[in-house]
Amino acid sequence: MGLYDFITKDISAENENKRVIVSIRILYIIAFFAYVLDTIWVGLDAFKIYPYRTAAVGIMLIAFFILTYFSRTLIAVTLLMGFLLFWILSMFPVYGWSAGMQNYFIIALMMCFFTSHGKIIYKFLYAGFILVLRILAISLYGGMKSAVGVSVLEDKLLQITNITAVFTAIIFLSYYYSQRENEAENKLMKYNDKLKEEANTDQLTGLFNRRKAKEFLAELKKTETDNGISVAIGDIDFFKKVNDTYGHDVGDEVLKAVANIMREKSRSDTFLSRWGGEEFLIVFPDCNGDNAYVALERLRNALKNTVIKVGDREIRITMTFGLSEFGYGMDEEVAIKEADEKLYMGKQNGRNQVVY
């Protein structure tokens, strides 16, 4: 079993929070290294003057770490809190105030809010309890010198060790628990984006749908452009014949192919939507009617000259377009109606053309 598997091993009890247990184990490991380094810097004097409390810290650290593989989450959290408080308060006389043991109060406070799932009132009461202990620690131990005669160098090494351990724990807890929230939030945002996209997209062709087209026109009318806005409605000629001859499945493939050609032959700012059935609504932002006419002619010719292959069938289609220039004072419904009327004129006059 590797180190990662050893640390992340689940506990024997059922229905327990593995994530919390793993975080507690990592905090014990961080504390263990800090404890060992503190002992190395101070030397054996700590065991000579305060043998019981110094040994007790090490024994508790190892024992409580082992218990994380067998105890329930709440018990494991409580034991960690108890260990941190015992370690802080018992080591002030050993290492002195300047060693920075008081900084471990921050870890105890963070653990309360990150790992506990009790009522919020209990969390705030516990935070108040930590605050009171911190104030008492200042009152009782503030400025206390080490009883084991720590040198200036050893004092600095103790400070570096403990502040590094605390910062490492803070960074770990912040990342470990915020990552889950960020992941959940990102999933929710992606799901919302997906729902929004589905609400605005025609599922068959992947183009925008009628609802989105109306919203887009209403918003576009509020903008100011130098060249105006053009609106066109295109309809596949004799599409009913395609469905009657080859079936609706083939008809769907033809609609998809037409949508793809429209995407390929249109500018990136051109708004393409399926208006309904075999009709498509096209909006040309910042484009006057003359330029839109040229673009539609290019699209019409591309469609006419393309062979759409569906299985072993080769199908050719044409489209007729009605084009209207969308004036600023014009209602979008009026512009659409005008384009539709011109489409009808194109249908009456032979199809496969752009009527402007």
Image (cartoon, rainbow, N blue to C red):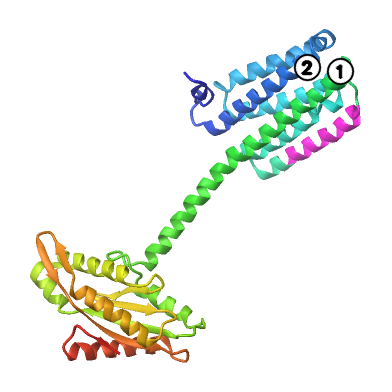
User: Which residue is found at the position 40% from the left and 78% from the top?
Assistant: 214
Asked if the stretch drawn in magenta spans residue 327, the answer is no
Q: Is residue 242 left or right of residue 15?
A: left
Quadrant in which residue 62 is drawn: top right
Q: Would you name the residue on which mark 2 appears? A: 41
Provide residue 149's location: percent of width, then percent of height: 89, 15
10 Å crowding of disc 2: few (<14), some (14-19), many (20+): some
Q: Secondary structure under badge 1?
A: loop
Residues shaded magenta: 125-143
Question: In the image, what residue type sits under mark 2?
Answer: Trp
Quadrant in which residue 295 is drawn: bottom left
> Looking at the image, which is closer to me, 211 or 99?
99
Q: Which corner quadrant holds the C terminus?
A: bottom left
Q: Is residue 60 left or right of residue 216?
A: right
- CB under 8 Å between discs 1 and 2: yes
Decide: is 193 above or below 232: above
Residue 116 appears in the rendering: no
Answer with mark 1 or mark 2, whichever residue precedes in sequence: 2
Q: Would you name the residue on which mark 1 appears? A: 150
> Looking at the image, which is closer to me, 63 or 118?
63
Q: Name the residue furthest top.
A: 48
User: Which residue is found at the position 66% from the left and 25% from the top?
Assistant: 30
Asked if the stretch drawn in magenta spans residue 137, the answer is yes
Q: Secondary structure under badge 2?
A: helix
